[in-house]
Amino acid sequence: MIKNLLVANRGEIACRVFRTCRTLGIGTVAVHSDADADALHARVADAAVRLPGDTPAETYLRGDLIVKAAVAAGADAVHPGYGFLSENAGFARAVLDAGLVWVGPPPAAIEAMASKTRAKRLMGIAPLEDVTAADLPVLVKAAAGGGGRGMRIVRRLEDLEGALAAARAEAASAFGDGEVFVEPYLENGRHVEVQVLADTQGTVWALGTRDCSLQRRHQKVVEEAPAPGLTDGLARELAELAVRAARAVGYTGAGTVEFLVAGGRAHFLEMNTRLQVEHPVTEAVFGIDLVAEQIRVAEGHALEGGPPRARGHAVEARLYAEDPARDWAPQTGTLHRLAVPDGVRLDTGYTDGDTIGVHYDPMLAKVVAHAPTRAEAVRKLAGALERAAVHGPVTNRDLLVRSLRHEEFTRGRMDTGFYDRHLAALTEPARDPCAPLAAALADACGRSRFGGWRNVPSQPQAKRYLMAGEEHEARYRHTRAGLAAEDDGVRVVHADACRVVLEVDGVRRTYEVARYGDRVHVGGIALTALPRFPDPALQRAPGSLLAPMPGTVVRLAGGVDEGAAVRAGQPLLWLEAMKMEHKITVPVTGTLTALHATAGQQVEPGMLLAVVRPDQEHGEQREQPPSPRTRETT
């Protein structure tokens, strides 16, 4: 029997495994990097072991250090979580060689499915060898690893060699394996997967389907179980193929077999030899704890009877600290508050006041709703996200709410091209004309200790805020009866430092207000309070290119030096942060008069990277802020 378990991972998955361990009476051990010393998973574990360093390569990817940590802390089992070393057969062997229990599939099964090319051959599928124009479009994929890294869509034959070279380089950097392969790219397909659970006695369960079609950068954003709209015959076929894949490699524990469904046909993609991020929707529908089942299988217990009966529908949304309107650029800073209404499940590795750093994935939490029907589950999740308090950096919360309410999704007709078609409309900034007034009134109440009314009439008070990139002014007065709005048709019913009630044209609305420095959250809308008199020292010359996020300058564009002519949108340099590479482009057409960035340099948000003097011809054009283009790197 397992007594003490170490999770070789961080964040949300570590906290989730620890929760099950507490229920089972198992002691818990965390590992943490220096950047994660105060992270939630390190605080809630019974014991925690430091892995010196900050980056994944120094810490969570060091299997030797993790095994030593398990032995030093007295753990007798290791759970890999997902990501990092979770599908590394060498790490699994090292755990077993140290005399510890491995809560995962056999190393041989991991190896068999680790290469997508070998996995496809096991399933009787051969990759494309000699690609012709008739095969287009095609998808270049890394044979090892996943998460969209080492992946390129090719629509023109002349682009194939370049895509292969770029994918090989990225795969080698991310996984230590530069093998890539080519397969047909199916437009408008759905990403559907099957959860499998297998014991050591040869029993394999197929626990229904999941749809994971809403994706960005080939990574999932919204998942649900069961996958909607599948015929009974196709659902049975998917289950049979998944069980066949598990049996082919002698699989044990929890795993996922992934397919692309198009034209009523299933196309095998790969098998993930680990627990998936989206496993909670299967848990909700089948009423089981997959981590507990993993532990039971690792202890040698058999799966009893058949799979439990599925009940209802579950939907999960991944809440990321990222800006979807700026090519999904990740965000950093302090997460001041994270709270969701009762009735939904929240899996997170963060708590109020935690710092979102630059070294790891920007996922803050997963929010899961379960209900008797799909429509009810979708509505429940959208409502919970809309009412959630997410105070801090920009997140994808509004995008999630709008995605869940989009007709294409509510009717179950989405596919993997959903965001390609709808992103612009889904990322329209949220605005409320009363939000600046609510922020100003709350601020006035927070600063006023003795009341602001004066017997002599005075000019109205005014405060300026930035909302959705536009400046707004809120005007109000202190009166004998209290605060009053200057706008016709707006009546202040109540105002204090945290809550403002306004009546607009006979309709009363309540605004919860929270302020953190110059950042103000009014309900679900974030505002920035502007100073009355801008600081001249903070003004930048036209054409200034500022770092949009903290990170490391990994390289500069070739042949672009001071004095060179540049054009708006031209790549200038690349930043690496939060496991992604971000292309930073020239803000305006002109001449590069200064280049302050150097390869390897650490930068902070707002740091001056370069200056471009606009051409006279383009001088009247409105400059655009740097728009990073992102792709996964490690």
Image (spheres, grey):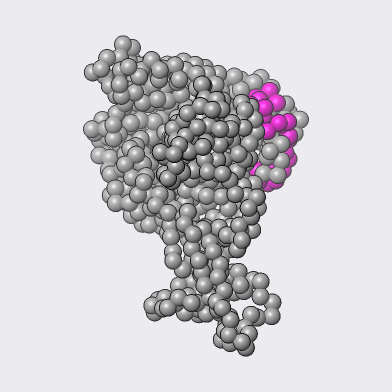
In-front residue for pair 490/362:
490
Classify residue 227 as left or right of residue 443.
Answer: left
Image quarter for residue 477? Answer: bottom right
Residue drawn at x 28%, y 31% as measured from the top left: 187
In-front residue for pair 593/129:
593
The spot of residue 630 in percent (x, y) is: 48, 34
For this orientation, the residue located farthest to the top is 130
Classify residue 344 as left or right of residue 235.
Answer: right
The spot of residue 359 in percent (x, y) is: 61, 35
Q: How many labels does the image show?
A: 0
Residue drawn at x 63%, y 53% as measured from the top left: 536
Q: Quadrant of the C terminus?
A: top right
Q: In which quarter of the image is the N terminus?
A: top right
Residue drawn at x 37%, y 44% as measured from the top left: 423
Residue drawn at x 41%, y 22% as measured from the top left: 141
The spot of residue 330 in percent (x, y) is: 53, 41
Find the magenta span and give its range. Answer: 40-65
In-front residue for pair 443/26:
443
Tell me: residue 211, above or below residue 524.
above
Q: Residue 257, can we see it? A: yes
515 in the magenta segment: no
Classify residue 32 as left or right of residue 159.
Answer: right
Classify residue 171 as left or right of residue 307.
Answer: right
For this orientation, the residue located farthest to the front is 616
Tell me: residue 469, above or below residue 442.
above
Tell me: residue 388, above or below residue 559.
below
60 in the magenta segment: yes
The spot of residue 279 in percent (x, y) is: 47, 40
Q: Residue 103, can we see it? A: no
